[in-house]
């Protein structure tokens, strides 16, 4: 499948409930210490939406199973945008992933780097867009310890 | 606005030496169980000399470091580029520098450049965080 044909593809929507215990676990794992994560009405840590992995399955992915060589996929960048305060525990989110863009660059040590930007939209129970997460994935042709890309 | 100025946000956070336990703890919390971060045989078969750190763990530490300072509820954007791999045993230093303060009327938009650096001086992560700070913001109210 050509890469440009991936652009615009979407995965199936998935539910994600922001949970108090999960916030506490995630905050500890990233050394977050602010009391806002540990009270009765905790807010999610900045990169907490990474744990949406517990709420997705194969159908949630906008990428066909054979689109990326998983042994060569690295994580080049990540971005979160919150359209208001980050969600708090108890929030029921609906997420949906979409391939926003695919592009190619030359690696510093030769070889082609094939990039894929995937965005996940997170909406609340009223359908309001509350957060978005962008993941930039790269498939390398050369050894993946090359500076500039990392899992 | 009281208590906010361009420049460093203060003491850096020093994290490490990183352990595989740190990686596993993050992997369990995030749901990313890629064995390349905890299974040495798997990592070697993939061409790496050892397991290596989960970039998203340190990205999470970096984001939390700066959000702990400004207040997590005020965060509006965080982006990070993964520049170089970090390895078990690394000591990572996290820093933040306010590079822009823009008056938006009801709040101040505060842009912070953030970085995570290995003990070698190599940049592990580089990124930006954006906060919307209310008029009564101060480091003391943000920490509460």
Image (cartoon, rainbow, N blue to C red):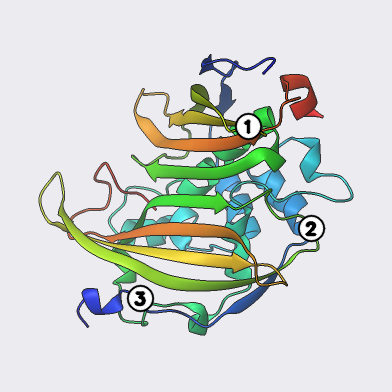
Mark nearer the viewer, 2 or 1: 1
Residue B52 horizontal/vertical position (percent)? 42, 47
Q: Which residue is mark 3?
A: A8
Q: From the viewer's perspective, is residue B9 above or below residue B47?
A: above
Residue A86 horizontal/vertical position (percent)? 67, 51
Looking at the image, the residue that sits furthest to the front is: B105
Q: Which residue is mark 1?
A: B105
Q: Are marks 1 and 3 on the same chain?
A: no
Which numbered circle lies on residue B121?
none
Classify the position of the C terminus of chain B by image quarter.
Answer: top right
User: Which of B84 and A50 lies nearest the eye of the viewer?
Assistant: A50
**Spatial CA span between label 3 and label 2:** 31 Å
Q: Chain of mark 3?
A: A
Residue B54: tell me if it is visible: no
Q: Are marks 3 and 2 on the same chain?
A: yes
- Mark 3 or mark 2, which has the lower sequence index? 3
Badge 3: residue crowd in 10 Å (few <14, some 14–19, many ≥20): some
- Write the residue at 45% across / 58% down: A134
- Write the residue at 30% across / 73% down: A68
Looking at the image, the residue that sits furthest to the left is: A110
Classify the position of the N terminus of chain B by image quarter.
Answer: top right
Q: Quadrant of residue A7?
A: bottom left
**Spatial CA span between label 1 and label 3:** 37 Å
Disc 3 element: loop
- Write the residue at 58% across / 33% down: B104
Disc 2 element: loop
Disc 1 element: loop
Q: Which residue is mark 2?
A: A89
């Amino acid at each position: 499948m050509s890469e440009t044909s991936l652009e615009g593809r979407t995965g199936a929507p998935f539910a994600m409930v922001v949970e108090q215990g999960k916030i506490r676990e995630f905050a500890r794992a990233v050394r977050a210490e602010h009391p806002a994560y540990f009270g009765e009405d905790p807010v999610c840590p900045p990169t907490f939406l990474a744990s949406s992995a517990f709420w997705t399955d194969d159908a949630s992915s906008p990428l066909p199973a054979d689109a990326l060589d998983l042994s060569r996929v690295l994580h080049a960048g990540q971005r979160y945008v919150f359209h208001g305060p980050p969600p708090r525990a108890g929030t029921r989110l609906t997420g949906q992933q979409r391939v926003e863009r695919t592009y190619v660059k030359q690696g510093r040590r030769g070889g082609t780097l094939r990039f894929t930007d995937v965005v996940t939209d997170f909406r609340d129970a009223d359908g309001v867009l509350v957060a978005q997460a962008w993941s930039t994935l790269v498939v390398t042709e050369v050894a993946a310890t090359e500076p500039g890309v990392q899992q | 606005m009281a208590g906010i100025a361009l420049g460093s946000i203060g003491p850096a956070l020093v994290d490490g030496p990183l352990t595989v336990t740190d990686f596993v703890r993050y992997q369990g919390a995030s749901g990313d169980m890629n064995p390349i971060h905890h299974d040495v045989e798997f990592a070697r078969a993939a061409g790496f000399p050892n397991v290596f750190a989960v970039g998203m763990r340190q990205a999470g530490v970096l984001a939390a470091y700066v959000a702990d300072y400004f207040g997590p509820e005020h965060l509006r954007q965080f982006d990070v580029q993964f520049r170089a791999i970090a390895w078990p045993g690394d000591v990572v230093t996290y820093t933040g520098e306010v590079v822009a303060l823009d008056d938006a009327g009801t709040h101040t938009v505060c842009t912070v450049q953030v970085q995570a650096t290995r003990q070698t001086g190599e940049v592990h992560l580089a990124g930006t965080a954006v906060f919307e700070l209310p008029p009564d913001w101060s480091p003391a109210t943000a920490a509460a």
